Image (cartoon, helix red, strand yellow):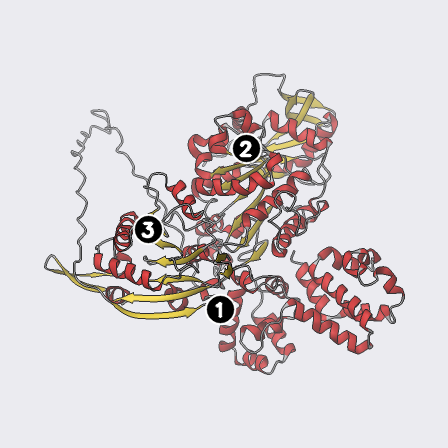
Amino acid sequence: MPIHNEAFSRVLIDVALNESGWNVKDDKVVRFEVKGISGRADYLLFGKFGPLAVLEAKAEDKDPYDAKEQARKYAEEIKVPFVILSNGRQHWFWNYERADQKDAYRIERLPSLDDLERLRLKNHNPPTALLSDTIGPDYLKPFRKDIGLRIYQIKAIEEISKRFDEQKKRKFLLEMATGTGKTLLCAALARRFLVTRNAERILFIVDRIELAKQTMEDFEVILREFKPVIFKTARRRPMELLGSCVVVATIQSLMVDRRYRTEFTPFHFDLVINDEAHRSIYGDARECVQFFQATRIGLTATPKAYLLNVNIDRLGQENPKILEARQLRDTYNYFGCEPGVPTYRYDMIDGAKDPEGPFLCMPKIYDIRSDITTQALDEGGWAVVINEQEESYKIQDLERKIFTPERNRVMCEEFLKHAQREPNGKIGKSIIFAVNQTHATNITKILNEMQPELAVTITSRVQDASDISKEFRDGKRKERVAVSVDMLSTGYNCRDLLNVVLMRPIFSPTEYIQIKGRGTRLYTFFYDGKAYDKQHFYILDFCAVAEYFQEKYDYTIPLPLPKPRVEAIPPGPSPEPGAGGGIEPVPSPEPKPPAPPKEIPIWTGRDIVVSEEVKIVGPDGEKVDVMTFRGRFEKDVQEFAEENPDFKHAAEEEDDDAVETILQERFFHNPEMYYSADKLVKTYGVPAPTPTFVYGALGLKPIPTRQQVVEDTVDSISARFNLKYNEQKLLSAVAGIVVEDSESLRKFLDDDVTLYDSTQFNRIGGIDMLATFDHRDEVLGALKQSMLVRQTILGAMTQ
């Protein structure tokens, strides 16, 4: 590929300027080769009140970033606030007047005149720190009295805010289980960005219009004064769209006719939040997401970890294109996180075991198999004679390659028999996941034959499916059962759902976790003057899905990359007669009519239930729930212990020093997971030494909670110094706050007495209490040297 000079780059830059609304022929807005004392600026861009930006051009094979200091000299001489660096292919932007923006950063498209004018105004009234806006449990109560923020939601917001303020991070990933209130958390986080002026406009991207409407239900309450709108409808009223500070949009509506480019500028939004981020950052959607030069936050319960279990260095040498493909699709990588380590994680197990909660409920799994299902699950498949020929069908073939009406009837009968009921005796709300839309319709027909008006089909081919799904969720329909395929598998918030029914096989752990998440939300039923809490939801599994992910799925194999879509290449025009050195053109064959669709056979034989098994899932979840960083660590430690007898012996003997030494030398920092002591502290949320996590992973000793570690530390120090009751209470308050709050930890380590001005200490005497505290310096010094504080510092270092 030829390398072009700077003149060619300027042609590309001119095109890029035009695309962003600059008229390069108008010297009132764009001037070239502007001379000064320090040299000659390639481009000077003007606004309403004079020059706005210097644009320095470089040849296509040069990195434009290297011209940063050269361009800064021009900018300082001309007194413009912005520097743009470009080689026509890559663009860099630097708001060098702002003290908090110390470096240039890559942008996908050049800013428009309106972008730069808005940024200049923002420079005159810079934002305050995110952390300057205090957030507590009651942060949202002024907007609706019945909603409050939970501790883990506040921690997630604080984690992002701290990294934004102190580390200048601009990419974040929240990995949070379905049902933990991601939308509410985002509303609070968006509010903090808006009130501190770190964002004037926010874009919230979802992947279905139903989710956009669902999101607006919270945003219209919590962010009302910022005039939230849905892009799809508001774009017909441009004044309403431009007047909104919060735009909720589906990725599809932004991409139609590339509206994100024609209706917005690259700097229009200051914050972009991607809901279900594991899906909305790939393929064509990626260009849309990257177009906006904004802080990015991803939300998902199931990040796609395409770099886990991959030897990155080796793959980079052997096949750099495949490595690049994995990096592009890896959710963690996209949001600036290390493999498997999000900015903040709160998974299903955290929700079930939270000492403040529980906030989620676990399933009771009914594994029910018919004769056909059992045979189809076998290695040889279900052998059956069709049209006088023996055919074999696997579980994934049923209802795709052969219809089995009697199996469907058996599944429906067993569903009615085992489904969890509400306190009033009615079948609890249920979602049945079918193989495809035809299967969904057939299941609905069977159920309504058995009990009229019991079921409704909710799929994309059903008219008004979005409205039906909302009415079903809100209890405004007679039907108790929704039969769907994929439409209700993500983002569908039906709190009183009691049954999740799997009438199709699932082979993706991401899909399984998402579908399970429909039932995890807590709910309280009121009947006959009494309250009944939802203790479990039922998974009625007719395809051995739970067993597959518990016993057969190999979590150590890297995720397979999706196969690229092969676009059909239309035949080109025939060459002109005599072209090609006198060779006569070959006439194109007549196009063949499309083959008629293959008729799918219908099995009319009997089917019966041959096995039933019930399993109550405990707070530790299923195997599929823990295959995150924490779950992988526990599995890898167990395998490591089996392969290394000296390590296993050291663990069984609780030889802490030997365990740590072996881990450091032979286990930590491997190229797949990069395990380390600090990550374990952060991931488990417990300020404990590494051997503690090892003993827990090997089943030798339970891992203590954070509160237990605090209490043990306080008891130990209290006994050593023979503390009085009030002194122990003060020590307990100090220990409790330093492990929960990084700013309090800093004050404690710096001997900053303002730490004791907070509410926790006022109740027990505050600063005055310190004056009467015998051996105060020795006691607090012992706390500083304790494993509790040392491990808390270690965990804070990864923040």
Amino acid type at circle 2 is: Arg
- Where is residue 761 shown, x and y percent of the image? 79, 60
Residue 58 % position (x, y): 59, 32
Could you give the CA–CA distance between mark 2 and mark 1, rounded to whole angstroms? 50 Å
Q: Assign a secondary structure to mark 3.
A: strand
Q: Earlier in the sequence, mark 1 or mark 3?
A: 3
Amino acid of disc 1: Gly
Q: Quadrant of residue 33?
A: top right
Query: Residue beneath label 1, please?
Result: 618
User: Mark 2 or 3, which is nearer the eye?
Assistant: 3
Q: Is mark 2 on a helix, strand or loop?
A: loop
- Marker disc for residue 455: 3
**Residue 774, image x and y in percent?**
88, 71
Name of the residue lying farthest toward the right: 771
Q: Which of the two marks, 2 or 1, is nearer to us in this view?
A: 1
Identify the disc placed on residue 109. 2
